[in-house]
Image: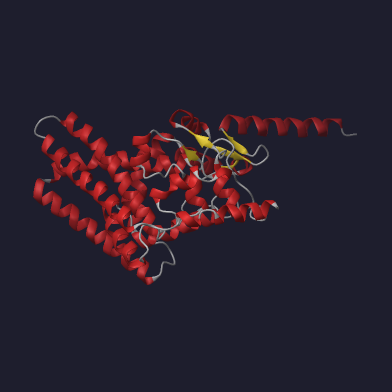
Amino acid sequence: MTSKQKQLNLKKQMAPYEKSDLTRSIMQLVNTLGPFFLLWFLAYKSLSFSYLLTLGISVIAAGFLVRIFIIFHDCCHHSFFKNRKANKIVGTITGILTIFPYHQWQHDHNVHHATSGNLDKRGTGDIWTLTVKEYQDASWSTRAAYRIYRNPFVMLGIGPIYVFLLKNRFNRKGARKNERINTYLTNAAIAGLYAFMCWAIGWEAFLMVQGPIFLISGAAGIWLFYVQHTFEDSYFEEDDKWEYVKAAVEGSSFYKLPKVFQWLTGNIGFHHIHHLSPRVPNYNLESAHYNTAELQNVPTITLSTSLKSLRFRLWDEEAQDFTGYGAARQSALSKKQSRAKTASVKP
């Protein structure tokens, strides 16, 4: 069996796990939305006792908001329900709660799936990543912007504010009518919901509860997306060499999390499975992984080892691995010295 045939066979093995289960989907809505709203209410009530208690409850509520986003994410892939209309309705509602317009994010995320790890098709729905050569050839302003963008405090702190609150409010260029309308309706619903909450409990109380929930869940969401494609021995190739299955299995990590975090993040740590077959609902990802022999040796990271990815800044095409700015500078200096030495020995 050729390498190509093995890859196609691996993708076919995902078919049994692509079937959504209505009962499990409904139960997931109940055990996710119910606790989130209860925690939000308890956080509000705790304001009269201690804001430290409020923050503690908000941390847990943020975890459930991440889980709500995973449901939204599944709906965008039409994997949460068999019925496309049900996915759209639930996806739009959970998009309002997570501040994401359903159709807009669905488009960008589908592009991400179709181009993940493709060096010639970067730029939509992914983290800005430059190769060592691109960074060395870039202007000082581009390098400065890139370094600011990849700074953990900016990426995880300012990133959620920019992406969720600002970028998501505007339609992309070339968006179709139904996508534009969905974005407008989502924006109107978010504004209406927030205005109602400010009227009902006061804007100060609303911000004191919703603020930390939004910032914590936003940082967690961006971290998950970042670390699942930025890890040691990841996969990037030029378009003529790029392969979908290899990009999924080798370029998307298995983020092995403690069970409580695995549950709150809707099994999204099995990201290689998700990229291999986006139609697998989140509650089937774990089974798909452990019941597929060929996937037992995929790139695996843990909470502790994933922290190393904060040092990964640039993709080194020669080494086929991530590296930092210092290594890039050293590489450029070595090449410059090598050229100078070659030039000096020429007759």
Q: Is residue 18 left or right of residue 239?
A: left
Above or below, comparing residue 323 to residue 246 in the picture? above
Where is residue 256 drawn, in percent x and y?
Answer: 45, 36
Where is residue 196 drawn, in percent x and y?
Answer: 13, 54
Residue 105 versus residue 303: which sits nearer the camera? 303
Above or below, comparing residue 333 to residue 145 in the picture? above
Residue at x 39% of width, y 34% of height: 153
In which image quadrant can residue 250 be found?
Answer: top right
Q: Quadrant of the C terminus?
A: top right
Where is residue 217 drawn, in percent x and y?
Answer: 31, 41
Q: Is residue 188 left or right of residue 132?
A: left
Q: Is residue 150 left or right of residue 52?
A: right
Which of the colour schemes (rainbow, by chain, secondary structure, one colour) is used?
Answer: secondary structure
Residue at x 77% of width, y 34% of height: 339
Residue at x 44% of width, y 54% of height: 280
Residue at x 63% of width, y 55% of height: 239
In which image quadrant can residue 151 be found?
Answer: top left
Q: How many marks?
A: 0
Residue 238 versus residue 336: which sits nearer the camera? 238
Above or below, comparing residue 185 to residue 34 in the picture? below
Residue 325 seen in render: yes
Outermost bottom residue: 177
Where is residue 223 drawn, in percent x and y?
Answer: 41, 39
Residue 243 seen in render: no
In which image quadrant can residue 72 be found?
Answer: bottom left
